[in-house]
Image (cartoon, rainbow, N blue to C red):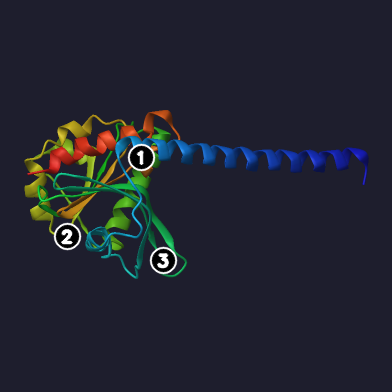
């Protein structure tokens, strides 16, 4: 092996090692910042998955085909009649699938929700290349929701502005339509990033994973928590 080849291989391994180290350091830094933010928000890690949370998650997500659900990285906070949670969710059946990371959830007697899933759609030019890709992604999301989650698409013929800004699914489309028609969904239409909101009964969740990197300074845990509380107020009775 020539000196140049050896130098090239050595440089490659050093570069790869540097990437691994920086990723590890960044991950440790993020975890440290996350713990600090959670403490600031008053969240604590329980010893095991709370039974109330487990039962609500299963009621909301266990309509998937061949699913066995597992929760981890759970954090909890109690506020009056509200049980607040942050958790990761996995389907452990078969090869296993991550269903959501750092999902925010609330159990509250002030919630009386039909089983629904709502995804906000940011503004984009449908005639552009990115717009075409977004349309294809939304088609896949809709197909997934209808086939895998057992939900039906909910349409709003009397609110055409909703059709372009929300993809809504439910087990009972009429009940979901009637419930959402009176809610202040206009406040969600102005959000520049996609949100996935789901709920049933006294349980509401938001998954921010489609909104971008958790490490983004504009999407830290505190700002996500504030957005979550804002959305909860919309759906509370």
Which of pointers 1 and 3 lies earlier in the amino acid sequence?
A: 1
Element class at badge 1: helix
Give the foreground label among 2 and 1: 1
Instruction: Say which residue label 2 marks.
Output: 171
**Residue 64, position as x, y percentages in the image:** 30, 65
Pair 3/2: label in front: 3
Labels 2 & 1 near each other (Cβ < 8 A): no
* Label 3 SS: loop
List the residue tagged with mark 3.
92
Left or right for 108, reference 146: left
Please state the horizontal and vertical placement of residue 196, each as a whole percent of the image: 28, 45
Compare marks 2 and 1 and give the one earlier in the sequence.
1
Q: Nearer the viewer, residue 70 or 98?
A: 70
| Secondary structure of residue under mark 2 | loop
The residue located at (12%, 59%) in the rendering is 172
Q: Give the residue at mark 1.
A: 38
Q: Could you say which is closer to the camera, residue 78 or residue 23? A: 78
Task: Determine the image quadrant of residue 10.
Answer: top right
Q: CA distance from mark 2 to mark 1?
A: 34 Å
- Residue at 40% over, 69% down: 93
Q: Residue at x 36, y 50 (%)?
A: 45
**Disc 3 crowd, CA 10 A, few/some/many (<14, 14-19, 20+):** some
């Amino acid at each position: 092996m020539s000196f140049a080849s050896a130098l090239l291989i050595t440089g490659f391994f050093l570069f790869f090692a540097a990437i691994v180290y920086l990723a590890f350091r960044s991950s440790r830094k993020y975890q440290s910042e996350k713990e600090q933010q959670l403490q600031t928000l008053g969240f604590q890690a329980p010893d095991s998955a709370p039974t109330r949370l487990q039962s609500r998650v299963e009621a909301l997500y266990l309509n998937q085909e061949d699913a066995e659900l597992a929760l981890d990285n759970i954090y909890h906070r109690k506020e009056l009649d509200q049980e607040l949670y942050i958790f990761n969710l996995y389907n452990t059946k078969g090869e296993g699938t991550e269903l959501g990371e750092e999902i925010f959830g609330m159990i509250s007697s002030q919630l009386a929700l039909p089983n629904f899933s709502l995804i906000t759609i940011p503004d984009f030019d449908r005639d552009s290349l990115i717009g075409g890709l977004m349309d294809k992604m939304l088609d896949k999301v809709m197909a997934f929701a209808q086939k895998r989650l057992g939900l039906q698409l909910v349409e709003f013929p009397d609110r055409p502005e909703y059709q372009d800004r929300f993809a809504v699914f439910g087990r009972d489309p009429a009940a979901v339509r009637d419930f959402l028609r009176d809610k202040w969904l206009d406040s969600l239409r102005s959000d520049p990033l996609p949100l996935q909101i789901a709920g049933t009964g006294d349980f509401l969740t938001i998954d921010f994973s489609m909104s971008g990197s958790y490490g983004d300074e504009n999407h830290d845990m505190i700002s996500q928590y504030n957005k979550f509380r804002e959305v909860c107020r919309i759906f509370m009775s």
